[in-house]
Image (cartoon, grey):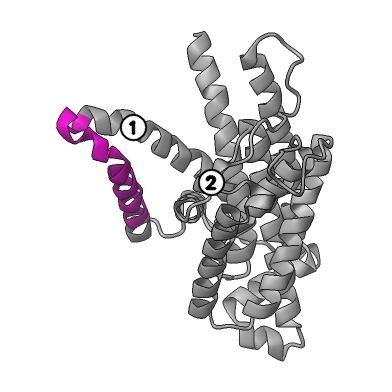
Amino acid sequence: MGGELSFLIFFLIFASFYSLSSLGLNLQWGFTGLFNVGIVGFFAIGAYTSAILTGPAYPDTMFGGFGLWFPIGFVGAILTSGFAAFLIGFVTLRLREDFLAISTFGIAVSIQLVTLNFESLTRGPNGMYSLPRPLSGYFESGTLDNLLYLILCLSIIAVVYWAFERMVRSPWGRVLRSIRDDEVAAAALGKNVFAVRLQSFVVGSAVMGLAGAMYANFLGFISPLDFIPIFTFQVFVMLIVGGSGNNLGALLGGLVVWGIWSGSDQIISSILPPTIQTQAAAARIVLIGLILAVMLLYRPAGLLRERRIVSREARLPDPK
């Protein structure tokens, strides 16, 4: 029982990183229609920022080793990811949708190359180690320490979910959806389309950076190999499966797809003969691709459809 409980807690902690990233993507793509294919880049910026701020001093780096308290690392991750998104979005958000996707993908790859080669900052392929895990050491049991971290993750997700629900139900949220549905009409009504798209891009990317910081401090070690493009693909599948344009769907998709991804090892091992089980990693990607294809064919709105949101002022009075 102890082993199953430890696995469940570990599984939910990892699902929370993906669900939080999916929430950030939902604001950008689900509500605003921004095709950001550079999710992993902002995730990496957040992870490395928190690692530098909260991690120990390394003899082979010029920066970092501040050993700060983990909330400072998390806030730093939000700020740096948001600032990077502001710079990137200021340049790219005037591009057409397909060019935006290509440019954000290229930027994410560039960020990974920076983490790989800027060794005086990131230690390159050697990675950053001994990162402090928040709320650890209160118990002798590692399972209870992980349970505390899971509570922290769920608390952060609850706050972000509440904030996003308030945002998408506000007048600003209605502008987001109007831009997504008809950008020209929104501009004709006097809305500053570029400014609102940039705001959505910055807020969503900042949440992705926060997810990266939570990931780094939980594992205690990060390297450039943690931030490869498959992460972006996973988060997109999670949002499509859960339901684009629905914050609860974004969280549900993260949980469901991560469950399939992490459980696929056992499934594939039981199906494939031992001689080709080393290719199981590729089979997992095929499996996720199949799930995506099935969802797009038979349930394109996802498990939870986008809810119709009407402002209080626009609601008709109940007939008497």
* Up-down relation of residue 126 to residue 144 (above or below): below
Q: Which residue is mark 1?
A: 265
In percent of width and height, residue 150 lies at 66, 28
Specify the amino acid type for callout 2: Pro
In percent of width and height, residue 62 lies at 75, 49
Q: Main secondary structure of the magenta part?
A: helix
Quarter occupied by residue 35: bottom right
Front of the two marks 1 and 2? 2
Residue range of the region highlighted in magenta in the rendering: 271-295
Q: Which residue is mark 2?
A: 125
- Residue at 74% x, 29% y is 134
- Residue at 65% x, 76% y is 178
Reading the chain from its start, which is encountered first: label 1 or label 2?
Answer: 2
Q: Is residue 275 left or right of residue 186?
A: left
Quarter occupied by residue 306: bottom right
Indicate the secondary structure of the residue bearing disc 1.
helix
Between 29 and 311, the one nearer to me in the picture: 29
